[in-house]
Amino acid sequence: MNTGEPGEGQDIQPRYEKYILENSGIRFIESDLFNGSGPKQKELLQEVLIEHDLDLLEAVKETAEEFTRLRGNKVEIFEIAYFG
């Protein structure tokens, strides 16, 4: 599939995506085959020993929402107003 022609970064996906997917072994996860499990349900395992309640943690909105999705009612999130 190498054309020998120089190309721009934004041209790679439209030009080569089909070829890459067919020849690289990359496969999309079909959540129906795994009882609804998919990439968004994957969790990184980290073991941490907590001996007391943690102080407040500042995080971006997306990270806070991910904590809530993973830990449910054990997480409390609220927006902090910043003044510049």
Image (tube, rainbow, N blue to C red):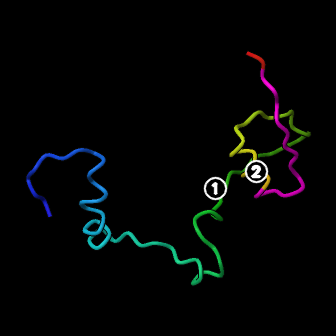
Residue at (38, 69) in percent of width and height: 26
The answer to whether 31 appears left or right of 17 in the picture is right
Q: Vertically, is 5 above or below 31?
A: above
Q: Quadrant of the C terminus?
A: top right
Position of residue 31 measured from the top left corner of the image (x, y, whole percent): 58, 77
The answer to whether 24 appears left or right of 49 in the picture is left
- Residue 9 found in image quarter: top left
Q: Is residue 79 magenta?
A: yes
The answer to whether 19 appears left or right of 26 in the picture is left
Residue at (46, 72) in percent of width and height: 28
- Mark 1 Cα shell of 10 Å, populated few (<14), some (14-19), many (≥20): few
Q: Vertically, is 12 above or below 9?
A: below
Residue at (59, 82) in percent of width and height: 32
Labels 1, 2: front one: 2
Q: Residue furthest top?
A: 84
Front-most of 81 and 76?
Answer: 81
Callout 2 secondary element: helix
Q: Amino acid at mark 2?
A: Phe
- Residue 61 found in image quarter: top right
Residue placed under numbered mark 2 in the picture: 67
Callout 1 secondary element: loop
Front-most of 64 and 7?
Answer: 7
- Mark 2 Cα shell of 10 Å, populated few (<14), some (14-19), many (≥20): some
Q: Amino acid at mark 1?
A: Leu
Q: Vertically, is 20 above or below 44?
A: below
Front-most of 1 and 35?
Answer: 1
Residue placed under numbered mark 1 in the picture: 44
Q: Which residues are magenta?
A: 69-82
The answer to whether 70 appears left or right of 40 in the picture is right
